Amino acid sequence: GNSVTQMEGPVTLSEEAFLTINCTYTATGYPSLFWYVQYPGEGLQLLLKATKADDKGSNKGFEATYRKETTSFHLEKGSVQVSDSAVYFCALRSSGGSNYKLTFGKGTLLTVNP
Amino acid sequence: NAGVTQTPKFQVLKTGQSMTLQCAQDMNHEYMSWYRQDPGMGLRLIHYSVGAGITDQGEVPNGYNVSRSTTEDFPLRLLSAAPSQTSVYFCASSYMIQGSSYNEQFFGPGTRLTVL
């Protein structure tokens, strides 16, 4: 079955530090890959996505590249801000016309200090 | 658009009580789903639906029932609450366009349930 493994947290950084959150996956075929963000007390929001190998998703200064050879989709940001403090989830959706279910990693809590 | 709405935001139950968590969306999405979020476990799929009258089980369906009588609503029923069902519950919905990369899932704000 499908699975997503992401870096255990919590991660604590100072403002303007570089961020990497690792994510690897197991799936058959060519899944779509996503990063969701959950701010305190809120639901999940889509941060970025990539639907095929070598695609780079980007949003709000965050980037992730779909690497099929290493089955990875690591999240990066060059300079984090206090407002980036949140829980980040890596997720995949299988390829195939009728499969819309998401499989999530366990989440990584990021705290950015001023 | 209100997006995906969930009620209530918070609920406390006693063991054995029943209740229904409400979920509604106004985006005409075909696909709707329920997840539970537990510390260190990420989100796990409980039930999902691909249209009115069609539902199916996810990863952790035991103790929960769902129905989908309209496109807009997808209630989740706890028949006899247990402490193991203490969790945060999220409803999500999306379009179902085959082969499209635009089937983003939109999440509601969640219901925090405590079972004593």
Image (cartoon, rainbow, N blue to C red):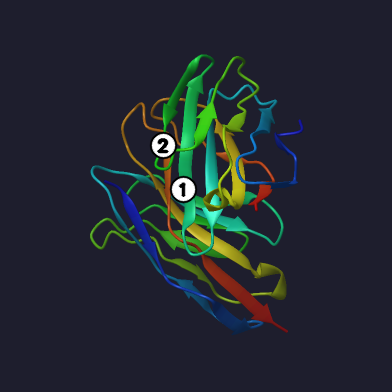
**Which residue is at 43% across, 58% downward?**
A105
**Which residue is at 54% across, 78% downward?**
A11
Q: Examine the rendered structure and indicate whether residue A68 appears above or below residue B50.
A: below
Q: Chain of mark 2?
A: B
| Residue designated by label 1 | B44
Mark 1, other Cα within 10 Å: few <14 / some 14–19 / many ≥20: many
Q: Residue B80 falls in which quadrant of the image? A: top right
CA gap, disc 1 and disc 2:
8 Å
Q: Residue A77 falls in which quadrant of the image? A: bottom right
Question: Label 1 sits on what residue type?
Answer: Arg
Q: Is residue A51 visible to us here? A: yes
Label at residue B58: 2
Camera-nearest residue between A49 and B111: B111
Q: Examine the rendered structure and indicate whether residue B22 appears above or below residue A91.
A: above
Q: Is B47 positioned to the left or the right of B78 in the image?
A: left
The reply to whether callout 1 and callout 2 are in contact (CB within 8 Å) is yes
At numbered mark 1, what does the secondary structure look like: helix, strand or loop? strand
